[in-house]
Amino acid sequence: MNQAVEQLIPAIAVYVKDKDSPLSKTKLLKLLYLFDVEYYRLHGKTFTGFEWKFFHLGPWTNEYNPVLEGLVQSGSLRARPYSTVDYDGCNYEAKEDCDFSSIFPRVQDEMVLRGVLSVWAEKSLGEILDHVYFHTEPMEQGIRHALLNFGLIPREAPERYQRTSSGKTPKELAKLRKQFRQKQKEIRPHQANSFAFTPPRFDEEFSQAFSKLNEAPT
């Protein structure tokens, strides 16, 4: 397991709370799974390092409960009990603000997580389960009680920055460069003059004030 998961979970809890949305144990787990799916799509490996299995409500891992309980015991998470007609559970909140940037050295990876949360953080658990169960590659071909195969996820190469063409011909570009250099030559003399240093002028009032400052007790 990636030890950064212990930072990731409270950070997700902060994000979901800021959206005024509940965060149950199951919802939190499925958000971690969805992040792992998209992270694998980019890197060919999961972020959490969990061994995901096809269980009752889709993806599950035996490593999840100890991590969650440890975060509650350490005070990083607060578990708020709730009860419905059919179910008793807890909503999870972080006790302190957590920042994604401290978890991800690369902004690109942080954006993967933010992309997942922007879509699913405010969705109901039912909507998330439906998507996870029927629309993610490891689950689509998963076998109950067996490990999920993330290798079924097609890889996506990161986009490379490429300058777009201006549409100018080489002759037009040469003319524009010449005009630019000419303008630079015209500007430089004015820039040199504008930054000329003027010596300070100390009047009698300044001298008296400075003398009083020197005479003041320390």
Image: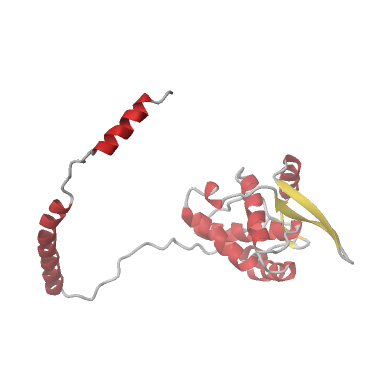
Q: Residue at x 30, y 33 (%)?
A: 208
Q: Quadrant of the C terminus?
A: top left
Instruction: Depth check: give the residue in front, 103 or 156.
Output: 103
Q: Position of residue 18 (x, y in %)?
A: 65, 60
Residue 139 horizontal side relative to residue 108, left or right:
right
Compared with 100, 153 (above or below) is below
Q: Position of residue 209 (x, y in %)?
A: 33, 34
Q: Residue at x 16, y 75 (%)?
A: 169
Specify whether residue 43 is in view: no
Specify whether residue 155 is in view: yes
Q: Residue at x 35, y 29 (%)?
A: 212
Q: Position of residue 5 (x, y in %)?
A: 63, 47
Compared with 119, 202 (above or below) is above
Q: Residue at x 79, y 54 (%)?
A: 80
Instruction: Depth check: give the residue in front, 131 or 82.
Output: 82
Compared with 130, 64 (above or below) is above
